[in-house]
Amino acid sequence: MYICMMCITATIGFGLQFHKEWKSGVVPQLVSKMGLKKYSTLYVLLAMLSGGLINLTGYSLYAWYMGRRVLYINTMAAQTDTHEFAYAFSLSDESGIQYVMIMGILYLVVGAVASVIALYVSTLTENKYLVMFSPYLILRCYTEFCKAIGIPDNLRIDYYLLGRVDIGDSFTEFIVIIVIVLFVVAVIGQHFFKK
């Protein structure tokens, strides 16, 4: 359920805004002033930032609340064989701050990707509910497709982005891979405006 809400709330910012701006006639004026490439780059980056920050804010509130109420990182590490646990290298310190940071970054990336998907769908349809649910629907279809053809869990992109499988063996590798993913999403998102 949290994955559904995470994908939907990420679209609240710029993911839903494009259609409103297009309908009001603001987009052609802005494109004529700024140029299509500059406008699309700025809009995609703002969409990624708004979707990512919405998810990061929600996760940060959750982590803060759980950190004050429950020692959930230490309990999780104590009850689980840390070699089987995703991002076990981040649980080496007692506080689990690195694990919380990794999950926060993943939530930011998922929000950015969801917002760009919603932005693209908003160029295709006027239905705001379809735009809001499109990231979750695409994730759900991808999940069912992976199950149907038998893609192993360690090769599924959704498992990487939702923190179920490690990305890299260290925090530095994790950050480099995440930056590459964000760059690719930004470049792909910019091409949506060429429609």
Image (cartoon, rainbow, N blue to C red):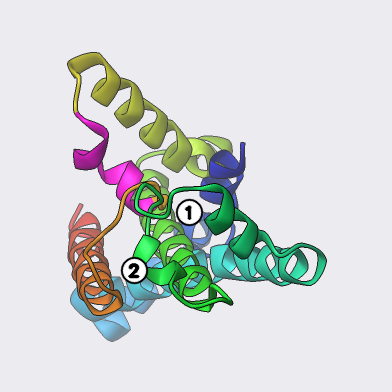
Amino acid at pointer 1? His
Name above or below for residue 141 compared with residue 189.
above
Task: Give the labeled residue for mark 1.
Answer: 19
- How packed mark 2 is, by other alpha carbons closer than 10 Å (few <14, some 14-19, many 20 or more), is many
- The outermost residue toward the right is 69
Which secondary structure, mark 1?
A: helix
Which secondary structure, mark 2?
A: helix
Amino acid at pointer 2? Val
* Foreground of the two, 172 or 25: 172
Q: Where's residue 149, x and y in %?
A: 18, 17
Disc nearer the start of the sequence (1/2): 1
Q: Is residue 167 left or right of residue 60?
A: left
Task: Give the labeled residue for mark 2.
Answer: 44
Frontmost of labels 1 and 2 is: 2
Q: Where's residue 37, x and y in %?
A: 19, 75
Quadrant assignment, res 190: bottom left
Q: Which residues are magenta?
A: 152-161
Looking at the image, which residue is at 37% across and 34% down? 138
Q: Where's residue 110, x and y in %?
A: 42, 56
Q: Is residue 77 left or right of residue 125?
A: right
